Amino acid sequence: MTFLKTFARASCAVAAVLALSVPTMAGTLDDIIARGKIQVAIDMGSPPYASTDAQGAPQGSDVETAQKIAADLGVELEIVPTTGPGRIPVLLSGQADLVVATFRITAERPNRWLFRAPTA
């Protein structure tokens, strides 16, 4: 299994774990593949990670990561623009299947979220 599939499944696992405590939740991996689209929340105002170019097209390393996840799963990518503070609420509300972003690991977050070690 490729890194991206593992990453996507781990991200969806976060959503599945949260489903136990949140009434509205993002789709499972099977749901994502069945609908043919993955909804990825990205803070589009954080260059060089994510922004838009002069033509309004999304660009940056977070965007490229989301594109690779979608391609690896064989589904269309829908970017759900969000803000830094909006990353978790957009996931919890079911508006996105996963979030691609940098997150600082605080004392509280590991109790509710799964973190993956950074990779190159």
Image (cartoon, rainbow, N blue to C red):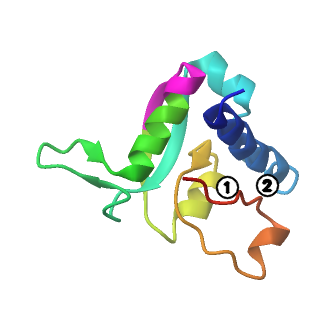
Whether label 2 touches label 1, CB < 8 Å: yes
Residue drawn at x 56%, y 25% as measured from the top left: 72
- Residue 21 position in % (x across, y down): 85, 57
- On screen, residue 97 above or below 104: above
> In the image, is 85 to the left or to the right of 48?
right
Residue drawn at x 54%, y 34% as measured from the top left: 69
Task: Give the magenta part as a residue range.
Answer: 71-78
- Residue 46 position in % (x across, y down): 35, 65
Residue bearing the label numbered 2:
22
- On screen, residue 97 above or below 89: above
- On screen, residue 82 above or below 55: below
Quadrant location, the N terminus: top right
- Residue 35 position in % (x across, y down): 60, 19
Residue drawn at x 74%, y 33% as measured from the top left: 28
Quadrant of res 64? top left
Q: CA distance from mark 2 to mark 1?
A: 7 Å
Q: Residues within 10 Å of mark 2 (few under 14, many from 20)?
A: few
Q: Nearer the viewer, residue 93 or 1?
A: 1
Label 2: element kind: loop
Residue drawn at x 47%, y 69% as measured from the top left: 84
Label 1: element kind: helix
- Say what amino acid the circle numbered 2 marks: Val
- Say what amino acid the circle numbered 1 marks: Leu
In the picture as drawn, the residue positioned furthest to the left comes out as 54
In the picture as drawn, the residue positioned furthest to the front comes out as 120
- On screen, residue 94 above or below 117: above
Residue 26 makes an appearance in the image: no
- Residue 88 position in % (x across, y down): 61, 62
Quadrant of res 29? top right
Any mark on residue 75, and which?
Answer: none
Residue bearing the label numbered 1:
92
Q: Is residue 92 in the magenta section?
A: no
